[in-house]
Amino acid sequence: MGFGIQWELMPTLYIVGTPIGNLEDITLRALRILKEVEVVLCEDTRVTKRLLARYEISTPVMAYHAHSTSAQHKKILDLLAGGKSLALVTDAGTPGISDPGSKLVELVYQEFDGAVPIVGVPGPSALTTALSVSGLPSSEFLFLGFLPHKKGRDKYVTTALASPCTVVLYESPHRIEKLLTALIDRAPERTIVVARELTKIHEEVKRGTPGELLALLVSEPEKRRGEFVVMITPQ
């Protein structure tokens, strides 16, 4: 990458999983790491500060997200080059899973060529949480993340319906009805599992055909709130 970094000490970049809803879902190891590092890199500083405050952690935070600039990347690399250990978190779940965390990890690999250890600190993930309660085959699965808003969306739906294994994807409350409508048109009898608000007060997991699930959302609009994990049975 060539940011002109001069490496001095042995730092570490920790990739730390944080709760997807219930703040009790954080590991003892994650809490220790968040206390010990010099800076916590986070998607939204307000969200992460609430988590840190809950556990009386005073570590400084720095924003890192999809719109971070080259200057911000260099600042992070400079910290690592100066021997500072950092923790990367996302607003909810495990960094790098449908968020820009993987970009930073790639930059660190490129810049330091393995001299800076990158250590995963396992934690919550909406993907695995939803699969565990779905009752669908999960020894193999295809994860598609968030579907595109417009361009290429139909192609992803075609891929999902043709998969020989369970498909998992994320969807927003603004587009969940659009997705279910597309599934009604193309696979009306397929079993779908929809999980929303996982680990939160209004957590809910529903199974049924696309038509049954869409009818539920239409009749109870409050069930359209929150982020959704959608799982589709194999072909």
Image (cartoon, rainbow, N blue to C red):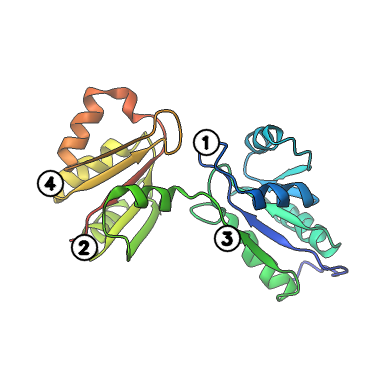
Residue picked out by circle 2 = 162
59 sits to left or right of 204: right
Marks 2, 1: nearer the viewer: 1
Disc 2 and disc 1: Cα gap in Å? 35 Å
Disc 2 and disc 3: Cα gap in Å? 28 Å
Residue placed most toward the observer, 46 or 28:
28
Residue picked out by circle 4 = 188
- Look at 57% across and 38% down and name the residue there: 24
For the residue marked with disc 2, what is the amino acid? Answer: Ala
Dot 1 lies on which element? loop
Upstream in the sequence, badge 4 or badge 1? 1
10 sits to left or right of 29: right
Q: Is residue 169 visible?
A: no
Disc 4 and disc 2: Cα gap in Å? 14 Å
x%, y% of residue 86?
74, 55
Marks 3, 1: nearer the viewer: 1
Residue placed most toward the observer, 186 or 88:
88
Residue picked out by circle 1 = 22
Q: Is residue 235 above or below residue 61?
A: below
- Dot 4: few (<14), some (14–19), or many (≥20) neighbours within 10 Å? some
Q: Which quadrant holds residue 203?
A: top left
For the residue marked with disc 3, what is the amino acid? Answer: Ser
